[in-house]
Image (cartoon, helix red, strand yellow):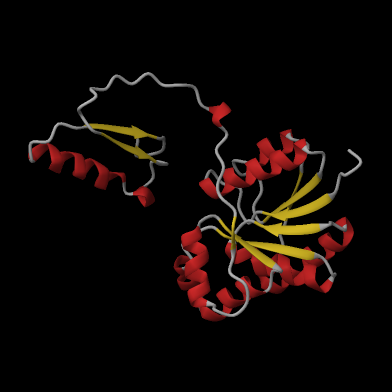
Amino acid sequence: MGSSKRYFFLAATLGQGGAEKQFYYLVKAMVRQGHNIVVGCFASGEFWQPALEALGVRVVHLDAVGKLGRLRQLYKLIKLIKPELVFSMHFYSNFYLALPARLLGIKAIGSIRGNGYHEYHELGYMLAAVCYYTPHRVLANSAHGSANMKKIFPMGKAAQVFENSIDTSDYAPVGLKTVPEVPVLLLIARLVPLKRAELFLQLLEKLTEMGHSITGVVVGYGPEED
């Protein structure tokens, strides 16, 4: 515990998504190492908040309105907490966290959770550039996203790749009887419209119509499960 440090992490949302689950894994690992983590979030009572609080992590609801309001609130909070480092989980929140941190002389780490172009098109060039260049360093969850961002914003260092993790202790072996010579096509996804699970079903149907023997397996849950 002698090496324990204080960190402030900003998760714009804590909903039931892949990015948020990776964020939980990161916080959990750092708490196990004895570090003190405070998490800020623009919403309250979301899916991952109880799990984080069960780790002993303080979750702060950032309720300020507008960009300037959020910047002021984060500046005051960071100044009060005095963390060793701040980390933003979502690309669009990099700016909100990195600017106050820089003004206070604190290192700031930003994130890219998509393919780069998604972030760019969603925010526009100017705001995306601010979110990319304001943090001292940016972490991408894929080499693809890092490379794309380097094409869009060639100045400065490329985003460093920080790969996703999987907690295998959460999963038990599943017995699935298959025939060795029959290919198995597997879809693993949260079953929401965004994931386009119907395309996987259409693929299975097309291959079957063409006379192929295949087994299709869907792993996931959500409103489209039925």
Q: Is residue 174 left or right of residue 167?
A: left
Q: Give the number of callouts.
A: 0
Q: Residue at x 49, y 76 (%)?
A: 152
**Quarter of the picture holding the C terminus:** top left
Relative to 80, residue 155 above or below? below
Q: Quadrant of residue 73?
A: bottom right
Whether residue 65 is visible, yes or no, is no
Q: Residue 68: give x, y in percent of width and height.
A: 71, 74
Residue extending farthest to the front is 181
Residue extending farthest to the right is 2
Whether residue 6 is visible, yes or no, is yes
Relative to 136, residue 36 above or below? above
Which one is nearer the viewer's eye here, 78 or 218?
A: 218
**Quarter of the picture holding the N terminus:** top right
Q: Residue 75: give x, y in percent of width and height.
A: 81, 67
Relative to 116, residue 11 above or below? above
Q: Residue at x 57, y 42 (%)?
A: 165
Q: Residue 4: give x, y in percent of width and height.
A: 86, 44
Q: Residue at x 59, y 53 (%)?
A: 162
Q: Is residue 153 left or right of residue 2?
A: left
Q: Residue at x 24, y 24 (%)?
A: 180
Which one is nearer the viewer's eye here, 163 or 17?
A: 163
Q: Quadrant of residue 77?
A: bottom right
Q: Residue 205: give x, y in percent of width and height.
A: 15, 39
